Image: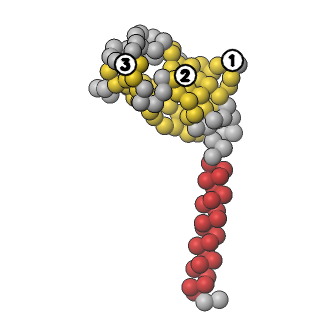
Amino acid sequence: MKKTAFNSVVALLLASSTLAFSQFAMAHAHLKTPVPADKAVVKTSPQNLTLTFTEDVEAAFSGVDVLNAQHQPVAIGKAELNDKQHDQLIVPISQPLPSGNYQVNWHVLSVDGHKTKGSYSFSVK
Ligand SMILES: [Cu+2]
C-alpha cells in the first residue's frame, strides 16, 4: 500500500470514529429548556429556575450557580430534581433578584454516567 493510500484510510477511520463519538455524545444530558429562557428579560425576579434536560439527571451530582453582572454568586437554594420528571432540576431563588443580568452555570451527571455543563443568561428588568 502506498503511503498516500494508507493516509487516506487512516483519515477515513478517524472521520468515522469521530462521527460515532459525536452520535454517542448526543445521548448525554444537554440543557433543553431553561425557565427563564436563555436571553429572556423578565419583569420580576423568578422564584425558581427550572432547567429541563434531554436526559434524566442525578441531582446529587448536578448543580447550578447563578452569578450577577459583577460575577458575584447569588444566594440560591439547592437544585432539586422534579419528583415527577427526572430530567428537570428546580433551583429556588432564596432572595428576589434585583434588576440586572444573570449568568447561570449548570453541570449535571446524566443517568448514563456522563457529565455535561454549560451556561446561559437572563435579565431581570
Ligand atoms: Cu452520555
State the scheme by which the image is colored.
Answer: secondary structure
59 or 102, which lies in front?
102
Type of amino acid under label 2: Thr
Q: Earlier in the sequence, mark 1 or mark 2?
A: 2
Q: Quadrant of residue 8?
A: bottom right
Residue tagged 3: 124
Residues at marks 1 and 2, CA–CA distance in whole angstroms: 13 Å
Label 3 residue near ligand 1, CB within 8 Å: no
Q: For the N terminus, give its image quadrant.
A: bottom right
Q: Earlier in the sequence, mark 2 or mark 3?
A: 2
Does mark 2's beta carbon lie closer than 8 Å to ligand 1? no
Question: Which image quadrant: the C terminus?
Answer: top left
Amino acid identity at mark 1: Asp
Label 2 crowd (10 A; few <14 / some 14-19 / many >=20): many
Query: Height in image: 26 above or below 88?
Result: below
- Foreground mark, 2 or 3, reads 3
- Vertically, is 118 above or below 98? below
Q: Which residue is mark 1?
A: 83
Judged by depth in the image, the label closer to the viewer, 3 or 1, is: 3
Q: Secondary structure at mark 3?
A: strand
Q: Is residue 68 left or right of residue 92?
A: left
- Residue marked by disc 2: 50
Which sits earlier in the primary sequence, circle 3 or circle 1?
Answer: 1
The amino acid pointed to by label 3 is Val
Gap between marks 2 and 3 measured at Cα: 16 Å
Instruction: Tell me which residue sits at (56%, 34%) in the image.
Output: 31
In terms of secondary structure, where does tag 2 sit? strand
